[in-house]
Image (cartoon, grey):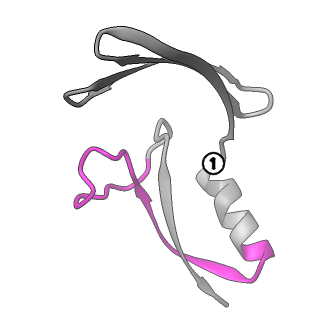
Amino acid sequence: MKTQDENVTLYRLSESNFDPQTNVLNIDFHFILIRKDKLVETFNETHKIKCYTLVEIRKYLEDNDFKLISARDWDGKNETEFKTPRKETFRILAIAKKS
């Protein structure tokens, strides 16, 4: 990914891997900051994301006195059109109500 304005360009490179045993997605980011065609800084970040299925989300909500009202596929591409989550859905928007 590349983001820039008239003075600064920021590159974000990433590499990810998913561990199906733990349902954890590890993402390693490498950032490169360039200002006026000169390298200013590089830095790294690692993100660990725990992934949950819709069944798990429902259970955790119920265990904490919430009722799942609706679940939607939130792919981030079209935030006005939410679809029903599928098995391969990465982001699920859960709408819940306190029981």
Q: Outermost residue, left direction?
A: 6
Is residue 5 visible to the viewer in this orientation of the structure?
A: yes
Highlighted range, magenta: 62-85
Taking 97 as reference, is 1 above or below it?
A: above
Q: Quadrant of residue 43?
A: top right
Residue 71 falls within the magenta-colored stretch: yes
Observer-nearest residue: 10 or 81? Answer: 10
Q: Quadrant of residue 49?
A: top right
Q: Amino acid at mark 1?
A: Thr
76 with respect to 78 (left or right): right
Point out residue 71 in the picture as x, y percentages from the top left corner: 47, 64
Q: Outermost residue, top direction?
A: 38
Disc 1 element: loop
Which residue sits at x=70%, y=55%?
A: 56
Residue behind mark 1: 53
Q: Outermost residue, bottom direction?
A: 99
Taking 79 as reference, is 20 above or below it?
A: above
14 with respect to 65 (left or right): left
Which residue sits at x=40%, y=52%?
A: 73
Residue 38 falls within the magenta-colored stretch: no
